Image (cartoon, rainbow, N blue to C red):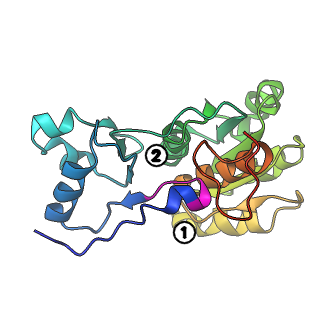
Amino acid sequence: MDHGILFDHARTARIGLPEAVFCEGKPREALLELLHHFGRNQGHPILFTRLEEDIFRHLPEDLQARYDYHALSRTAFGERMPDFPHGRVAVVSAGTADGFVTWEAARTLTYLGIQNTVFEDCGVAGLWRLADRIPAINAHDVIIVVAGLDAALASVVGGLTPRPVFCVPTSVGYGVAGRGATALNSMLASCAPGLGILNIDNGYGAACAAARVLHAIHGLPEGCSPEGSPNRN
């Protein structure tokens, strides 16, 4: 059955980032068709995001076996990009409640072949948790900060590192947290200069932003060299 889904297969060659499938809202039949096409040994690295566990676990077992699936982040891929030999990214979260976004970012980086380290539970309510880890965080080339509630972690990290920082507000929090609106506004109003702010819960987007920084410094991955773009590999 053709669901009218047209893939941008040339995206990797143009921008160094392959196409991803946002699964939320897609009919199960369409997802099943896509998953049949892009599993392991198909020659096309495709990342599936927002793929709910109950949908994945109800797939035929032979189809599940063709994917690397991570339930917390709701991500899956059959094949991934080749290892990118330059740079590392730190993914720093305020708390484990932000894990679904934290690990979406980390899994996307892994899928893109980029080395990454996750630093969870660095919320500033216990500032020592962050202070003890700052030297290790600053040993990375790019930092992703993930935080809900008042998202104060973004400003604190932004004042303690010279690295590029991308911040992701999460929908975690009671009442006036507003499903991430307060965290988003807090990050946008940060006094720390030069922070890049992503949309609420968009760990995937933050990982892609980090990848663009590394590609700009070190050159696009092998085989990706659009007209007018330097490739330093």
**SS under mark 2:** helix
Give coordinates of residue 20: x percent, y percent. Answer: 42, 57
Q: For the residue carrying disc 1, how many other residues have a C-alpha within 10 Å: few (<14), some (14-19), or many (20+)?
A: some
What's the residue at 84%, 49% (across, down)? 158
Residue 148 appears in the picture as rendered: no
Give coordinates of residue 74: x percent, y percent. Answer: 36, 47
In magenta segment, residue 214: no
Q: Quadrant of residue 148?
A: bottom right
Residue to which mark 1 is pinned: 178
What's the residue at 26%, 67% (across, down)? 26
Answer above or below: position of 9 versus 79: below
Left or right: residue 74 versus residue 180 is: left
Give coordinates of residue 51: x percent, y percent. Answer: 31, 52
91 vs 45, nearest the viewer: 45
What's the residue at 12%, 45% (across, down)? 58
Answer above or below: position of 25 versus 49: below
**SS under mark 1:** helix
| Amino acid residing under circle 2 | Phe
Instruction: Pick out the residue farthest to the bottom.
Output: 4
Quarter of the image with the N terminus in it: bottom left
Give coordinates of residue 27: x percent, y percent. Answer: 19, 67
Quarter of the image with the C terminus in it: top right
Q: Which residues are magenta?
A: 14-19
Tally of numbered tags: 2
Residue to which mark 2 is pinned: 100
Name the chief secondary structure element in magenta. loop
